[in-house]
Image (cartoon, grey):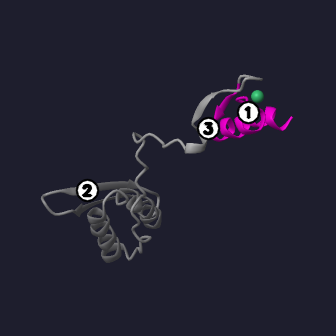
Amino acid sequence: MELEITINLDNYENIKIKVNGDTHTECIDQFKTIFPLLGNQSEHVYSKISSYAKRVFNIDLPKYTIKPVPPHQNIPERIPITQITVGNCENCNTPITKAEKDLSTLFQNKSLCKNCLKS
Ligand SMILES: [Zn+2]
């Protein structure tokens, strides 16, 4: 059998869904799958579809949840101050941070990285 429904969404907009199945139950099962997918982008559409589903087929749709907006990709990540390098290790040429430079200058009077200062 074939079932075709039209859900009115106001503003002269509507959604037409046609399903095919061997039995009435099979068609309804397809609606159950389709309804949540159609409504998951807009709360307005969701409310229309869920009230239709409830009224006409007595289907309870899962509660509408707003999809989390992906974080803004354009903002450059701020580099933590401890990772800003001020020069290179005099021993192994690894970039060193201000803290490392200050410490090694204090102890060895050289710009050394953490590893070279320890050894
Ligand atoms: Zn080093």
Residue 74 horizontal/vertical position (percent): 39, 39
Q: Amino acid at mark 1?
A: Cys
Name the residue beneath numbered marker 1.
113
Where 4 falls versus 57 (above or below)? above
Viewer-closest of 38 and 119: 119
Left or right, residue 85 beside residue 26: right
Viewer-closest of 97 and 111: 111
The image's mark for residue 98 is: 3
The structure residue drawn at horizontal position 40% and vertical position 54%, both measured from the top left corner, is: 69
For the C terminus, which image quadrant? top right
Q: CA distance from mark 2 to mark 3?
A: 63 Å
For the record, the magenta segment spans: 94-119
Q: Is residue 102 inside the magenta stretch?
A: yes
The structure residue drawn at horizontal position 26% and vertical position 55%, both measured from the top left corner, is: 16
Mark in the foreground, 2 or 1: 1
Q: Amino acid at mark 3?
A: Lys
Name the residue beneath numbered marker 2.
15
The image's mark for residue 30 is: none
Viewer-closest of 117 and 66: 117
Q: Is residue 15 inside the magenta stretch?
A: no
Residue 51 horizontal/vertical position (percent): 30, 73
- Count neighbours of disc 2 (C-alpha within 10 A) and say few if under 14, some if 14 to 19, many if 20 or more: few
Left or right, residue 22 beside residue 56: right
